[in-house]
Amino acid sequence: MRILILVPTYNESASIVKLLDRVTGVRADLLGAGHEVRLLVIDDNSPDGTAQLVETQGLDWVDVLKRPGKSGLGPSYIAGFRWGLDHGFEILIEMDADLSHQPEALSDLIEPVLTGDADLTIGTRWMPGGRVVNWPLSRQLISRAGTSYARLALGLELRDVTSGYRAFHRRVLAAIDLNQVESQGYGFQIEMVLTTLRAGFTIKEVPITFVEREGGVSKMSKRIVIEALWKVTVWGAQRLMLRR
Ligand SMILES: Nc1nc2c(ncn2[C@@H]2O[C@H](COP(=O)(O)OP(=O)(O)O)[C@@H](O)[C@H]2O)c(=O)[nH]1
Ligand SMILES: [Mg+2]
């Protein structure tokens, strides 16, 4: 299979080299199993020079998609999905740059997509076998409450709708209208879940260990949380009115 790991970055110079280093080991195993693995950094012109740092590593399996300025997580991923589809990749992975998502868990994450068991897998913190390390209680509460609200408002059975460690089969991204996806942060992850399910695809959750970042700063903001809450409320109201 042709696998592409998408990594959006905004000021991640503290962790991106370590990430590439750890992906190198995982990649060797996947290559051994007959897969092709490339990685695309989608950088929003990080002032700390993340893109240049990646380029100076000179890795022939890594590309950098340079964007003019900070646009948010959603638009960055949409640009990355388009790039991956255009280049013929079959499995497209979402992964954070801050090492919260363990590259070593990649094989388990993609397994159901490889075998055709699911069209999308989500690395889930809030299920048996999943856990979080060093994550402040306040963030855990926001995450769990957010998922509970989305489950209720949108009638979802998933246990971690905002997780950003995911593997899509290209058939999902090719089938949905990427122009219609409009959310930014957590809202983007929830919107992708909804869009995937509405298009008739299957989602499977895989337990992961999520480790709080050690370097750099989180781009999570009150605005991103409020956007997600607002969007879920609107989508929930539409669901009630349209009975979908
Ligand atoms: N390209 C791009 N990447 C972003 C943006 N905002 C966040 N990211 C990246 O998305 C990933 C998750 O963001 P992070 O700040 O760690 O969010 P948190 O884990 O919820 O605290 C990281 O790799 C960030 O660098 C953005 O506006 N543009
Ligand atoms: Mg993070």
Image (cartoon, helix red, strand yellow):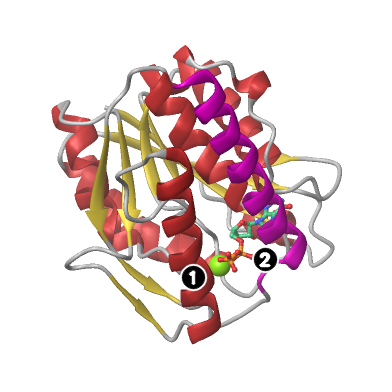
Residue occupied by mark 2: 220
Q: Residue furthest top?
A: 175
- Mark 1 or mark 2: whose residue is earlier in sequence: 1
At x 47%, y 69%, the residue is 99
Nearer the observer, 80 or 128: 128
Q: Which amino acid does label 2 sit on?
A: Met
Q: What stretch is highlighted in magenta?
A: 218-244
Determine whether the residue tagged by mark 2 lies in a helix, strand or loop: loop
Image quadrant of residue 154? top left
Disc number lying in front (1 or 2): 2
Residue 226 magenta-highlighted: yes
Some atom of ligand 1 lies within 8 Å of the CB belonging to the residue at label 2? yes
Q: Say which amino acid is labelled 1.
A: Lys
The residue that label 1 is drawn on is 18
Quarter, ligand 2: bottom right
Q: Percent position (x, y) of residue 182?
A: 69, 32
> Could you say whether the residue bearing mark 1 is in a helix, strand or loop?
helix
Residue at x 46%, y 32% (from the top left corner):
194
Magenta region's main secondary structure? helix
Q: Is mark 1 within 8 Å of ligand 1?
A: no
Relative to 195, does residue 13 appear above or below in the rendering?
A: below
Q: In this view, does 38 lie to the left or right of 225?
A: left
